[in-house]
Amino acid sequence: MGGAAHGKSVAVYTLSHFGELEKYGLIERSCRGHNGVKSVQTALGKNKMPFTRICIGIGRPKSHDPKVVSSYILGKMTPKEKNILGESAHECMKIIRDITDGVI
């Protein structure tokens, strides 16, 4: 994505992903140990191609058992959860526009 910041044209890269945040639909700008994001950081080179991370929370199970966590993450969303994520997607797009416009 290209955008303007302080009158200059800049390249902006944004990676949005789902993550195990405590609250469904919560938006955070860090990877918190997300292995997929770490892989992207490694592939792009942390300092060579910076990018903004936006994580949309999907909640998390109480258990830390890998099978329980995997089942939770890959399970079907309820209609309420889909609605919450839809609202979060709109907020995510606003953040991306602000980044592109140089607001943040």
Image: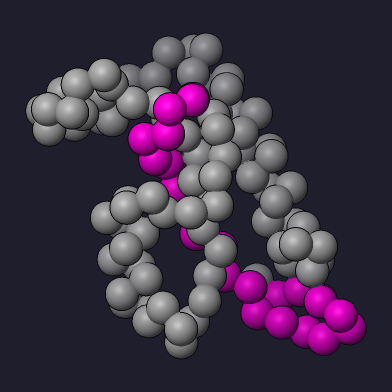
Q: Position of residue 10 (x, y in %)?
A: 71, 82
Magenta span has 68? no
**Quarter of the rendering containing residue 85:** top right
Task: Determine the main secondary structure of the stretch shown in magenta.
Answer: strand
How many labels, in total? 0
In the rendered image, which quarter is residue 90 located in? top right
Q: Residue pushed farthest right?
A: 7
In screen coordinates, is 5 left or right of 75? right
* Residue at figure coordinates x 39%, y 19% from the top left: 77
The reply to whether residue 75 is in sight is no
Q: How is the image coloured?
A: one colour
Q: Is residue 81 visible?
A: yes
State the image coordinates of residue 74 (x, y, percent, origin top left): 26, 30
Question: 47 above or below 64?
Answer: below
**Closer to the camera in the image, 33 or 18:** 33
Residue shown at 74%/66% (left/top)? 100
Considering depth in this image, is 77 or 22 the residue closer to the camera? 22
* Residue shown at 51% from the left, 58% from the top: 53
Q: Is residue 41 above or below residue 104?
A: below
Which residues lie in the magenta part?
Answer: 2-24
Give the left or right position of residue 16, taking residue 93 as reference: left
Locate the N terminus by quadrant.
bottom right
Residue 21 forms part of the magenta stretch: yes
The residue drawn where x is 48% and y is 54% is 30
Q: Where residue 66 sits: x, y (%)?
A: 12, 33
Looking at the rendering, in which quadrant would you find the C terminus? Answer: bottom right
Direction from residue 103 to residue 82 in the image, left or right? left
**Residue 96 image point, x, y percent:** 68, 56
